[in-house]
Amino acid sequence: MSPADNLLELLSTQLDSLNRSERKVAQVILNDPQEATGLSIASLAERSEVSEPTVNRLCRTFGVKGFPDFKIRLAQSMATGTPYISQSVDINDAAEVYTDKIFSSAIASLDATRRKVNPTMVEKAVDFLSQAQQILFFGMGASGAVAQDAQHKFFRFNIPVVAHNDPLLMRMQAAACRRGDVVVVLSFTGRTKDTIEIARLAREAGAVTIAVTAPDSPLSDEVSMALEIVAPEDTDVYMPMQSRLIQLTLLDVLATGVILRRGEDFQDHLRSIKQSLVDTRIAPQVTD
Amino acid sequence: MSPADNLLELLSTQLDSLNRSERKVAQVILNDPQEATGLSIASLAERSEVSEPTVNRLCRTFGVKGFPDFKIRLAQSMATGTPYISQSVDINDAAEVYTDKIFSSAIASLDATRRKVNPTMVEKAVDFLSQAQQILFFGMGASGAVAQDAQHKFFRFNIPVVAHNDPLLMRMQAAACRRGDVVVVLSFTGRTKDTIEIARLAREAGAVTIAVTAPDSPLSDEVSMALEIVAPEDTDVYMPMQSRLIQLTLLDVLATGVILRRGEDFQDHLRSIKQSLVDTRIAPQVTD
DNA sequence: GATTTTATGTAGTATTATTACATCAATTAC
DNA sequence: GTAATTGATGTAATAATACTACATAAAATC
């Protein structure tokens, strides 16, 4: 994010450190930012009961070129700014408040990742996955559930897929890998000793290894290619929440990539899998 | 949304119905909208190889006052417009595009749910969970991974926790439930026959049953209380993606609720669990 | 209470956008 | 095939808007 991105937030937090006149302007803006984006410097000055240069100076205080530029930043930050700020839960929060905070944090994390994901790497991972003879998902702890989820998704592609969360099984499977196998290693930190060693074993055995992990971690040095994701650890204070959602979504992206690579015919196959569930259900919900 | 809100989208859809010169301008804008918000009418005209009034006319075509106003609408629609609209992936999408679409859809789903969650129900579920003698998470298929994830989260609370994705095991466990047990049943559709029956068994055995499922589904009638979530099925065409993220996040909310209910002392306990992982890791990453 | 510093406003200047009009190209009518 | 009309585009003047340099007023410091 560029420095002056969350202009509205900046404006309200910096309110105290402004001059009296500049503060008047800031308050008028905060009072109705939408309106403010439509005003000329003259009208805004008038409403704030200050002179035009004062408005101009306020703008420059926030590191923008001038008033028109300021309005544009304002417009941007209104849409994207206020919501979705990763907030820590407070011990006194009511259900409504912490529910909102957790959802907002989840959204903020996904949004942050959305912009950071490297499409070239995604493409590359999809290349490997769609050519794999066998796919193995390895994840321990919370990543174990992610691995299981991935298995449940990739089995639809008519490739043998396994998921493990037990280090011993992983180790055995890794050693037994052959050329054509693709191993996806899931680790939030990329620093778990077992995981790193298992990745190495798999690679030595001839498998392509893909890590979904933190940037510049020991694990990402050890694999064929790394999909690097940054989780804002501040909200994951006591358990992994954000990092796991990010991994899951990224795996959704990879699965989607594989589907697209397979072409349209393949989508019939997927539809038939979904259809096979119908008999296990009550009444409606067939959805084409 | 006001008429001229999705300016970028409008711009690309209306591209064909524009004059030759105006189209040139539109293309320059679409090519780099961010950049365009920073240009003067003169520079934009130059880059588009048209005259300034042409640019001005284009702006008016989209029902805005003038060029500066246009830039502001553009800025807004960049932030709010494209994103967070649940878009289907197209077979011709490049990696960058489908990555963005999937993340955006995930965000859109979470955002939609965020506003629909009933805090009273959350509160109630937290009440049950924090008083439970034992917690059982049941989920089949993709919900199986969610159940496993939940187990991994709730085991930290010093309560016996089990997770199952096998209907037979679920059934046995359900029948063996006793007063004081809490069963959380995860089902996207709430219509899987097995799941519904298992929920009934558990309740008859004396357990409190909580469903995380679709509103007004057979399952939600069968349980002690239901946390109802609506997944936008349109993006989950071939596999459950959004619905699963929503369930996970909702379980994060419940876990957080339990933590808060336990009070500050309990947070030391959580910290010590996290600390216990340190030895399995390489070097840094202790985080307090 | 005098002096310096900081804040704010005034008036002129520069930039930027808009309008009115002219020219050119394309289409249609003859 | 040419003339007339319509629509598209550009030129140049005008108007609106924002910016700068400077002056004045207020506050803070000595």
Image (spheres, coloured by chain):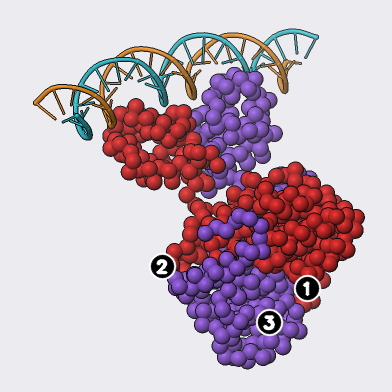
Chain colours: A red, B purple, C orange, D cyan
Residue type of the residue flagged with mark 3:
Ile
Q: Position of residue B104 (x, y in %)?
A: 63, 51
Q: Position of residue A30 (x, y in %)?
A: 38, 44
Q: Is residue B135 above or below residue A118?
A: below
Residue ID at (78%, 52%) = A223
Q: Position of residue B200 (x, y in %)?
A: 65, 87
Disc 3 crowd, CA 10 A, few/some/many (<14, 14-19, 20+): many
Which residue in the structure is indicated by mark 3?
B196
Q: Report the Cα–Cα distance between label 3 and label 2.
A: 36 Å
Q: Chain of mark 1?
A: A
Q: Is residue A131 visible?
A: yes
- Left or right side of B137 for A133: right
Front label number (3 vs 1): 3
On the same chain, marks 3 and 2? The answer is no
Which residue in the structure is indicated by mark 2?
A92
Q: Report the Cα–Cα distance between label 2 and label 1.
A: 45 Å
Which residue in the structure is indicated by mark 1?
A278
Going from the N terminus, do you reach mark 2 or mark 1 first?
2
Q: Is mark 3 in CB contact (under 8 Å) with mark 2? A: no
Residue ID at (59%, 24%) = B44
Residue ID at (66%, 66%) = A142
Count of marks placed on residues: 3
Residue type of the residue flagged with mark 2:
Asn
